[in-house]
Image: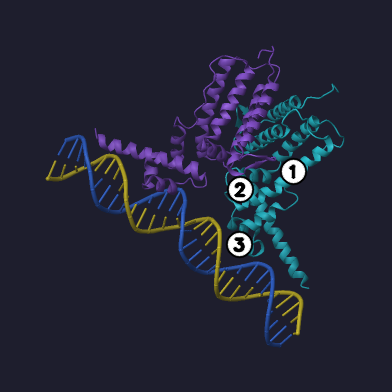
Chain colours: A cyan, B purple, C yellow, D blue
DNA sequence: CTTGACTGTCACCGGTCGGTGACATAGATA
DNA sequence: TATCTATGTCACCGACCGGTGACAGTCAAG
C-alpha cells in the first residue's frame, strides 16, 4: 500500500476543494474557473482535471460536502404546523445570510443553467427536502384548507431574494438592507405573514 | 446641418441599443460584452466606445429606454390598500415573467455590483418608486398597525425570485415552476398572504 | 476645389481563458 | 538496483476578451 501517496492525493484534493469554496464564495461564479481555483490552491490546474475530471466534477464534489447546506436545527418540542414553519423560516433566513458560499450558489442558479449549477443545486435540494420531512414529522401535516406548499415556496423565495440582495444592493423596495433594524422588521413581517396564513386553531398563548 | 450623417449616427446608435438588449436578454450578463454586442449589431465595437463611452454608458442608455420597466396599469377604481396591493402584485408578477430583459437585469444585480448594474438598476428603482406612489395615491396610506413596507418587500422579493427561478430551474421547494397550474397556485397563495396581512375592515365583497 | 470634421472598418495589442502534452520526481515493487 | 506507477510542474496552444491607433469614405463649409 502506498500510504503516503494516497495521503498526499487526498490532501491536495482537499486543498483544491477548499480553494474552490473560497474562490466561489469570495469572487462569485464569474471568478470560478480552473485557473483561479488552481491559483488559489497553490497547485497546477491539471490536477483539477486529473482528480475531478474538470470543473464540473469539482463542483459536484463541492456540492457533496456536508458542511455546505447545513440545515438549521428544528425546535425540539412538537408544535403547530404554523409555529414550526415560522421558526424554521426565521432560522433558515439567518443561516442563509451568514452562508456566503450558499448565497453565491443560489445566485449562480438564477443566472446560468449548466451541469455545474445542476450538480451544486442537487445537494441543496436534497438537504431542503429532508428538512421539510423533518418539519412534517415534528408538526404533522399542514392544514388542508390552504395550499401550504405554495405558501411555503413564496416565503422561502422571499428569504432567498432578500438574502441575495443584501450583498449587492443595500436597497430593496425602499428598505435599507444594510441596517440590522431592517432585518428585524423583515423577520417580524415574515412571522406575521406566516402566522396569519397558518392561524392557530385554538387560542393558545 | 449635416442631416444624413446625424441620421446615420442615430440609426446605428439604435441598432447598437437593440443589439445590446437582444444580447443581454438572450445570453444573460455573461455574454454582455463589447464584442458580442458589436457582433450582434453588425458594426464595429469601436462605435460603442465612441457613441456610448464604453459598456457602462451603453448600459446607462439602455436603462433610460422607457420600454424597459413598464409599470403595469393600476386598477381604475380606488379600493382598499390591501386590494390594490394584491392586484398590483399579481400584475407585476405576470409582467415580470414576460419580461426577459428585466429578469436578466434583476439576476445580474444579484451576482455583481458594478457601475453597469448600478446604471441599470437606477431606472428600475425610479419606475418602482413612482409606481408605489401611484398605489398610495389610489388607495391612501397603508394600515398603520402593521409594517406595510416590510410586508410588501417580502411579497415583491418572492415574486422576483420565483420569476427568476422559472427560467433556470423548473423546480423550487417541491413546486414545478414549468406548469401553468403551479403559477395559478402561487398567485392564489400570494393573494391569500396579502389578504390576510391587509384584512378588510368591513366585510365588503 | 480644398479643407476638415465625422462615420465606419480593420488590424493589432496584451491579457486571460480552458485545455493538453511533455517531463521531473518520488515511492512501491520486483 | 532496475522498473513502474502516480504525483506534481511547466510550457504551450487556440480562442476570446477589452481596448486602441491607423486608415478609408463621405459630406458640409470655406
Q: In what element is the residue under mark 2?
A: helix
In the image, is C16 to the left or to the right of A200?
left
Residues under numbered marks 3 and 1 in contact, where contact means CB atoms less than 8 Å apart: no
Tag 2 residue: A27
Question: Which residue is the site of mark 1?
Answer: A129
**Where is residue A60 drawn, in percent x and y?**
67, 55
What is the quadrant of residue A183 in the picture? top right
Eye-nearest disc, 3 or 1: 1
- In which quadrant will I find the N terminus of chain A? bottom right
Residue at position x 74%, y 68% from top?
A: A6
- Estimate the spatial distance between the alpha carbons at disc 2 and disc 1, rounded to whole Å: 29 Å
Q: Position of residue A63 (x, y in %)?
A: 69, 52
Q: What is the distance, in whole Å, between disc 3 and disc 2 at their CAs?
A: 18 Å
Closer to the chain start, of discs 3 and 1, is 3
Query: Is residue A176 visible in this depiction of the protein?
Result: no
Q: x and y percent of residue B37 in the render?
A: 43, 45
Amino acid at each position: 500500500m502506498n500510504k503516503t501517496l494516497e495521503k498526499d492525493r487526498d490532501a491536495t484534493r482537499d486543498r483544491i476543494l477548499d480553494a474552490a469554496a473560497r474562490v466561489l464564495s469570495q469572487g462569485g461564479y464569474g471568478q470560478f474557473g480552473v485557473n483561479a481555483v488552481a491559483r488559489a490552491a497553490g497547485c497546477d490546474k491539471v490536477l483539477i482535471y486529473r482528480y475531478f475530471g474538470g470543473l464540473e466534477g469539482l463542483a459536484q464534489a463541492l456540492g457533496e460536502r456536508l458542511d455546505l447546506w447545513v440545515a438549521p436545527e428544528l425546535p425540539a418540542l412538537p408544535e403547530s404546523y404554523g409555529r414550526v414553519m415560522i421558526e424554521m423560516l426565521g432560522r433558515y433566513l439567518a443561516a442563509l445570510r451568514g452562508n456566503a458560499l450558499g448565497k453565491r450558489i443560489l445566485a449562480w442558479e438564477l443566472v446560468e443553467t449548466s451541469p455545474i449549477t445542476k450538480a451544486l443545486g442537487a445537494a441543496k435540494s436534497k438537504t431542503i427536502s429532508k428538512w421539510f420531512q423533518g418539519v412534517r414529522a415534528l408538526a404533522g401535516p399542514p392544514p388542508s384548507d390552504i395550499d401550504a406548499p405554495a405558501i411555503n415556496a413564496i416565503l422561502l423565495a422571499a428569504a432567498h431574494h432578500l438574502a441575495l440582495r443584501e450583498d449587492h444592493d443595500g436597497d430593496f423596495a425602499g428598505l435599507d438592507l444594510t441596517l440590522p433594524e431592517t432585518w428585524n422588521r423583515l423577520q417580524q413581517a415574515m412571522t406575521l405573514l406566516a402566522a396569519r396564513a397558518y392561524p392557530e386553531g385554538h387560542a393558545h398563548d
